Image (cartoon, rainbow, N blue to C red):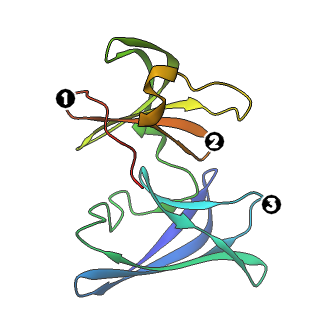
């Protein structure tokens, strides 16, 4: 199966996704669109970092079907940014502590809150520091389906 890679509404490459028993074999090649690190997404799920190759970008991975239920892409395409519909504004409290305005992403397992990361600035909620991770320029706090914080992976 072959799918387009979309960036700013334009097709910039192709990804092939082959059924390999309990795995998906992903082979993606696309144009380099900037000098920044680019990641490949399927909906809201980050699949990996694209590597420079022959003047473009590529990613080859073998992914467990059980670990990647979002594959093959429901919307028929891959992209260089997470699905916009998966992000919404958020304000509120966690464990009784107020958090600043941020963004929220929901999935079947719960919700991820994200706040812009500034290496010189403080954590959005210092009492909950150990529950945050820093990824892709954001402080991230994962909440389970009941709204309770979860420990970061890793």
Q: Is residue 34 visible?
A: yes
- Of callouts 2 and 1, the N-terminal one: 2
* CA separation in Å, label 2 and label 3: 16 Å
Report the residue marked by disc 2: 137
x, y (%) of residue 34? 78, 59
Name the residue nearer the viewer: 8 or 109: 109
Query: Is there CB contact under 8 Å for labels 2 and 1?
Result: no
Left or right of 136? Residue 42 is left
Q: How many marks?
A: 3
Residue tagged 3: 35
Q: Earlier in the sequence, mark 3 or mark 1?
A: 3
**In this view of the protein, which residue sits in the foreground, 5 or 116?**
116
Name the residue nearer the viewer: 147 or 43: 147
Q: Which mark is residue 41?
A: none
The residue identified by callout 1 is: 146
| Nearer-N-terminus badge (2/3) | 3
| CA gap, disc 2 and disc 1 | 26 Å
């Amino acid at each position: 199966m072959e799918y387009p890679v979309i960036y700013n509404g334009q097709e910039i490459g192709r990804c092939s996704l082959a059924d390999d028993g309990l795995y998906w074999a992903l082979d993606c090649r696309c144009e380099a669109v900037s000098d920044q690190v680019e990641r490949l997404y399927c909906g809201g799920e980050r699949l990996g970092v694209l590597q420079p190759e022959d003047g473009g970008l590529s990613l080859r991975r073998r992914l467990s079907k059980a670990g990647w239920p979002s594959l093959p892409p429901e919307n028929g395409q891959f992209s260089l940014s997470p699905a916009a519909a998966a992000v919404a504004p958020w304000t509120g409290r966690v464990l009784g502590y107020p958090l600043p305005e941020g963004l929220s992403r929901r999935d079947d397992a719960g919700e991820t809150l994200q706040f812009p990361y500034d290496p010189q600035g403080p954590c959005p909620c210092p009492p909950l520091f150990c529950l945050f991770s820093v990824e892709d320029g954001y402080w991230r706090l994962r909440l389970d389906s009941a709204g309770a914080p979860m420990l970061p992976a890793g």
